[in-house]
Amino acid sequence: MEFWILLWKAVFIFAVLIFSCMAVWVTIGGYFDLKKLFRKLNDIDDEEEEANED
Amino acid sequence: MESTFSEALSQTNFTFIDWIIVGVYLSISLIIGLLVKRFATNMTSYIGAGRALGTRLGVATLAGTETGLVTVMYSSQKGFTGGFAAFHIAIMAALGTFIVGATGLIVYRLRKLKVLTIPEYYEQRFGRKTRILGAVMLALGGILNMGLFLKVGSMFIVGITGMSATGWALPTVMTVLLILVLAYTVLGGMISVVVTDYIQFVVLSIGLLFATGLIIHHLGWQNIFDTVALQMGKKGFNPVLADGTFGIEYIIWMGFLGLIACAVWPAAVARALAMESPEAVKVQYMWSSVAYLIRFLIPYFWGIAAFVFIFTQAPELKLLFFPEAGGGEPIDNLYAMPIFLGRILPVGIIGVITAAMIAAFMSTHDSYLLCWSSVITQDIIVPLSRRNLSNAARIRSTRIIIVIIGAYILYWGLVYKGKDDIWDYLVVTGAVYFTGAFALLVGGLYWKRASSTGAVLALLCGFFAIFGLEPVRNAVGFDGLTGAQVGLFTIGMAFTAMIIGSLLFPDKDNLPNTNNNIV
């Protein structure tokens, strides 16, 4: 049983640490990705409007 | 017993301030749904976010979708009943997702084909009939799977806020949450889903980590392990034990699930198909493996902590959840974790955690509603329709179906009385779709001789998975089998049907679009 207790402790600590780092990366990077997404959707919107006018 | 239970629920720290925090969060979500509505002008934008997601946003939305309140609830239930041994499920899920990311299994090729839904690929490879049958199986398994999300999510709200668990409270919470989620899914489509997924990721990450820290501080790190060892013994740690909660068959079943939950499950694949490039899909999956690990691991830990709390600090709850012989039926153990959080988290923090959980609830519901409704529109209604439906008609159809599915999950949540753990219910209902779909996608993408007959037979095998549900097993006399055994057998059947059907009935050369496959 000692082996399993040690294993689950290590897994839990490792997972929480790596997730904390990932959360920071995704939070900051995701914000810039969102801005890029809206720019692209705006472009698609403009293109559709131009196509409709033509 | 009921009055004791109501008394136990009422001892929460949830106050008016916490309701304000939750209200502000929900208002922000609705406003976002309204603001991004103008971008949903065609089907690619409405259900695929214009295929413009960057890697970090892709990770956030995949993690946000697959970490729902229902995930937190069923995982905490598994931790509560299985102890630390349940951690193996999280490891299998993370490994499976990492392998899919590293190899690009299924998702890379699907993204390369630029399809909007999985059944759309079925048509390219196997013809229109397979697309429609595949979509029917997908919608059936998916909607059945989603049937308990609303009820389980609402049980969390009832448990943590201290409302009465009997009478009007649960159906009222279910109805209010459903109306909220329907409103902004119908309005904004995938774009509003992606934005709220991102917000959910941020709020939920902070909430999960912060609450975990408070739990450890409250119960003591070593005390948690010692109590589980004392009360559960080896079963609480070793998942391989034959007489334990899990066993080898269950672990193999979870290994398979870990792989396909991300590679075949449509709500996850929809994120891959919305990415800006096939290469970005691989990075998205490799990073998301961490989120797939944590989305199970932390709720397991919370369930274990609830168990420890009940045994060491709340003897009145012990009598409710583990009544002595002749002491009546135990209370549904899904309530254990929310009651526990309601008692240990301080005012303010409990509001933030509840808001984070409602965020998780909404982001999963909107994604799933959008996923199943778009499949029904794109892959059943449009192929069966004799005329070419306009974008506006397709979006309108998708929105109507979202509302119909919403009504169904409200009804199903109120009437279903199965006693399986929620996780096992979800696995079995999902298996109706994914056992056949896995054989179909692997065969279609990686085996030149896979034929439409083999594909149809493999899909139909998925129906057998329904025997994994406890009420169905009991009704037909299969009560000697476990859900895991039924699931593994169904996978074997689906692959055998795919191979034998393809070898005996190969396709003729004139199948529509067969040359579009990229084998």
Image (cartoon, helix red, strand yellow):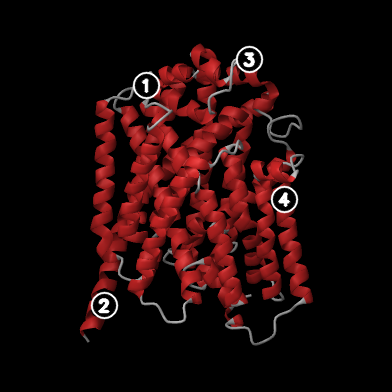
Q: What x and y, as percent, mark residue B305?
A: 51, 24
Task: Say which amino acid is labelled 1.
Answer: Thr
Mark 1 = which residue? B12
Q: Residue at x 24, y 56 (%)?
A: B34
| C-alpha separation, residue under disc 4 versus residue under disc 3 | 38 Å
| C-alpha separation, residue under disc 2 versus residue under disc 4 | 50 Å
| C-alpha separation, residue under disc 1 versus residue under disc 3 | 28 Å
SS at mark 4?
helix
Q: Which mark is in front, 4 or 3?
A: 3
Q: What x and y, as percent, mark residue B255?
A: 66, 47
| Chain letter of the residue carrying label 3 | B
Q: Are marks 1 and 3 on the same chain?
A: yes
Task: Say which amino acid is labelled 3.
Answer: Gly
Mark 3 = which residue? B326
Mark 4 = which residue? B488
Q: Earlier in the sequence, mark 4 or mark 1?
A: 1
Quarter of the picture holding the C terminus of chain A? bottom left
